Image: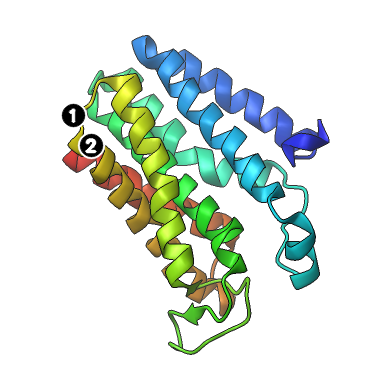
Amino acid sequence: MRFLLLDAVGIAAVLVAAFFVFAMSGSYAIQNLAIALIFLIIGIAITKYMYEEKKEKGVYEHERSWQNVLSNSLFPLISCGAYYITGNSAWIAAYIGAFAGAMADKFGSELGVLSPNPLSLGSFKTVRQGTSGAISILGTYLSFVGALIIGIAGFFFYNYAPISILLIGLFGLFGSVADSIAGVFEEKGIGTKSTSNFICTLVSGVLAYIFI
């Protein structure tokens, strides 16, 4: 199961999260699992993309564990739980938005990291590739593309209006920017990659809850 880029505990965490998503999503169970599966499959593919170059530059992230799974799935799980309790479909939008943020961050961190001379949001100076809190034009563009993938899935799976593709894409991008801002503090020893990931999904999920 090494192809999942997760250790045994991480794989178990994925299975537990999938169970709760299915159990708490009601009539949206299949669609919600499909969104999570799209994130997982594409995330694996882009993590493996240009593996040798990433490893040479020292920006390749190695095998993950439950912390990575939890940081990306906690707010989607909260959204599913809130929907289960309230029946308010806005929480399903929050679930989709959260994964848009997670996908945007994944594209930015795994593909945008290859962009030379990223700019730190803390110092507004160029920093080494892979520095938390840094952004680039390429990384920002790719983050938006990643979020749009989830927006397109939302359009087809949930019968949302076409404008939702753009909105979810933007919300995911905003989430990834929030992740980068949290990364500035991460570089200063305040927070971790996991907390930055959670902030990303929280911001994008809340925006989708309000506006979708």
Mark 2 vs mark 1, CA separation in Å: 6 Å
Q: Is residue 9 left or right of residue 33?
A: right
Residue 112's image quarter? bottom right
Residue 14 screen position, x and y as percent: 64, 30
Look at the picture and state if 148 lies above or below 141: above
**Quadrant location, the C terminus:** top left
Mark carried by residue 66: none
Q: Residue at x 51, y 69 (%)?
A: 183
Look at the picture and state if 197 lies above or below 117: above
Q: Are marks 2 and 1 in contact (CB under 8 Å)?
A: yes
Look at the picture and state if 188 lies above or below 199: below
Q: As rendered, which of 69 and 134 lies closer to the eye?
A: 134
**Quadrant location, the N terminus:** top right
Which residue appears farthest toward the top when viewing the image?
Answer: 27
The residue tagged 1 is 161
Q: Residue at x 77, y 54 (%)?
A: 62
Bin the neighbour count of mark 1 within 10 Å (Cα to Cα): few under 14, some 14-19, many 20 and up. few
Bin the neighbour count of mark 2 within 10 Å (Cα to Cα): few under 14, some 14-19, many 20 and up. many
Disc 1 element? loop
Residue 207 screen position, x and y as percent: 25, 47
Q: Residue at x 41, y 49 (%)?
A: 145
Indicate the amino acid at tag 1.
Ala
Q: As rendered, which of 203 and 116 lies closer to the eye?
A: 116
Disc 2 element? helix
Indicate the amino acid at tag 2.
Ser
Residue 23 screen position, x and y as percent: 48, 14
Residue 54 screen position, x and y as percent: 73, 63
Whether residue 101 appears in this view of the structure is no
Q: As rendered, which of 167 and 141 lies closer to the eye?
A: 141
Whether residue 81 appears in this view of the structure is yes
Mark carried by residue 164: 2
Q: As rendered, which of 1 and 92 lies closer to the eye?
A: 1
